[in-house]
Amino acid sequence: MPLITRSDLYYKDYSWTALYGDNPKVTGEPDSTLLNRREGYEILYFVNKFSEIHKVTQKLLATKIERMVRDEVPHDIRSQEGIRQWIYDHWQNSRY
């Protein structure tokens, strides 16, 4: 069961339209696939998967992940794995 749902997300300006070929119910581990920071399905998947991998159990901390993706992760880091690693490495120094 996911830690957070669409209504729990901090930002409310996401696009929720899966494009042809996109699967809004993506499964698997974060990998070299690029993460669209404005696509709600992708952010929701990423935040819940990061939470599962790193044993995050509080919704407040899940929204910290979301906010870090949007506001702190450098925009030249675009892969899911790169973003996951950056958040892991900078968790303690986040302004959130």
Image (cartoon, rainbow, N blue to C red):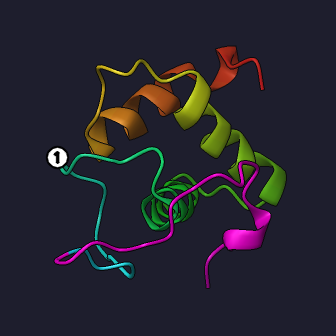
Up-down: is 69 above or below 44? above
Kindly identify the amino acid type of the residue bearing the numbered disc 1: Ser
**Snapshot quadrant of residue 51:** bottom right
**Image quarter in which the N terminus is found:** bottom right
Viewer-proximal residue, 9 or 20? 20
**Snapshot quadrant of residue 21:** bottom left
**Snapshot quadrant of residue 56:** bottom right
Q: Does the segment drawn in magenta span residue 14? A: yes
Up-down: is 85 above or below 75? below
Per the image, label 1 sits on a secondary structure element best described as loop
Residue 18, given in percent of the width and then of the height, sits at: 35, 74
Asked whether residue 76 is in view, the answer is yes
Viewer-proximal residue, 51 or 39? 39
Query: Is 21 on the left or on the right of 84, as rendered?
Result: left
Please name the residue shown 56% across and 21% down the image: 72
Residue 44, given in percent of the width and then of the height, sits at: 54, 63
Up-down: is 30 above or below 24? above
- Count of marks, rendered view: 1
Q: Does the segment drawn in magenta span residue 17? A: yes
Residue 73, given in percent of the width and then of the height, sits at: 48, 24
Up-down: is 66 above or below 74? below
Q: Which residue is mark 1?
A: 32
Please name the residue shown 78% across and 26% down the image: 96
Please name the residue shown 29% across and 79% down the image: 23
Asked whether residue 4 is in view, the answer is no
Per the picture, the main secondary structure of the magenta-coloured stretch is: loop
Magenta stretch, residue numbers: 1-21
Please name the residue shown 47% across and 68% down the image: 41
